[in-house]
Amino acid sequence: MIDTRVQSAPFDVAAETANLTAGRGDIGAVVSFTGLVRGDAGDTLTLEHYPGMTERMLANIAAEAETRWGLSGGLVIHRYGVLPVGAPIVLVLTASRHRADAFQAAEFLMDWLKVKAPFWKKDANGWVEAQGSDDDAASRWNN
Amino acid sequence: MKIELLYFANVRETIGRGAETRTFGDDVKTVADVLKALGDGNDTYAAAFARPEGLRFALDQMFVGVDARLRDGAELGIFPPVTGG
């Protein structure tokens, strides 16, 4: 079961990883991805999202990952609000018996979050435009 | 037909509000019809919807195309392509 959370508060990767694996002898691999706010030091990024739909889409994306790979557990945290450059913005944890499932599921989750999770980013230059390369990355999982 | 409209990002900023409830006549059946009804004779909405190919839509919180048919009481989100992750 991959848990999903949408929150403004920061997250603690070590604590979340420990929580995911506590008391579990069946987990042989945990893959962790943390996305950070890029930009010039001192700047901020504002993340707007669609409350309700965001939670729904994260749950859908997580459920899709569960059907495609043999996962022992996982966690997706996506933040919103005003975040300084360098701050963690998204966390994906995937746990599996062997590493291949965890690696692939983590990459899939990030690729689909990019194009299916209803977030919008605004930086010092205005609204950040969606990248075609993100669509390409997401579409390779379509088969 | 009553529709709960939600706007995000630059669409929200251009229109000047994030949400509103509108009642449309029988001629409004699809997402495209809503864009036309709101934009006709209103420069603000016309500007927000000037490039429909650059907009994305969610009907009751699921992505849909511009030809999707509406139901009375539906929630319709209108926004630019998402940039999650």
Image (cartoon, grey):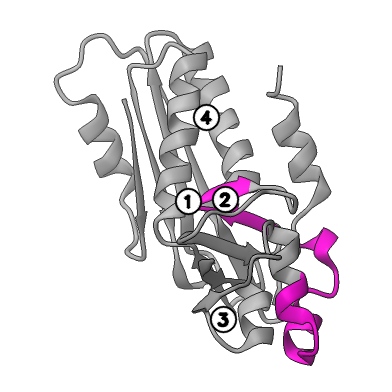
Mark 1 or mark 4: whose residue is earlier in sequence:
1
Magenta span covers which residues? B36-63
Label drawn at residue B85? 2
**Rendered view: B14 above or below A143:** below
Subunit of label 1: A
Q: Quadrant of the N terminus of chain A?
A: top left
CA separation in Å, label 3 and label 4: 30 Å
Q: Which residue is mark 1?
A: A90
Q: In the rendered structure, the residue with mark 2 lies on which chain? A: B
Q: Is residue B21 depicted above or below A129 in this figure?
A: below
Q: Which residue is mark 4?
A: A106
- Chain where mark 3 sits: A
Inspect the magenta stretch and tell me whether residue B41 lies in it.
Answer: yes
Residue A44 x %, y %:
56, 77
- Report, in whole angstroms, how far the alpha carbon at label 1 lies from the one at label 2: 6 Å
Locate residue A39, reporting x and y percent. 66, 69
What amino acid type is highlighted by mark number 3? Gly
Residue B31 x/y as whole percent: 69, 59
Indicate which label's residue lies in the foreground, 2 or 3: 2
Q: Which residue is mark 3?
A: A42
Is there a contact, CB below 8 Å, between mark 1 and mark 2? yes
Residue occupying the point 53% across, 12% down = A100
Decide: is A22 above or below A68: below
Which type of secondary structure does the marked residue at label 2 adopt? loop
Q: Secondary structure at mark 1?
A: strand
Chain of the residue under the numbered disc 4 shown in the image = A
The mark total stands at: 4
Residue depicted at 60% across the width and 76% down the height: A41
How far apart are the two marked residues, 3 and 1, measured between alpha carbons? 20 Å
Question: With A33 as the anchor, is B81 left or right in this view?
Answer: right
- How many angstroms separate mark 4 from mark 2 (CA)? 12 Å
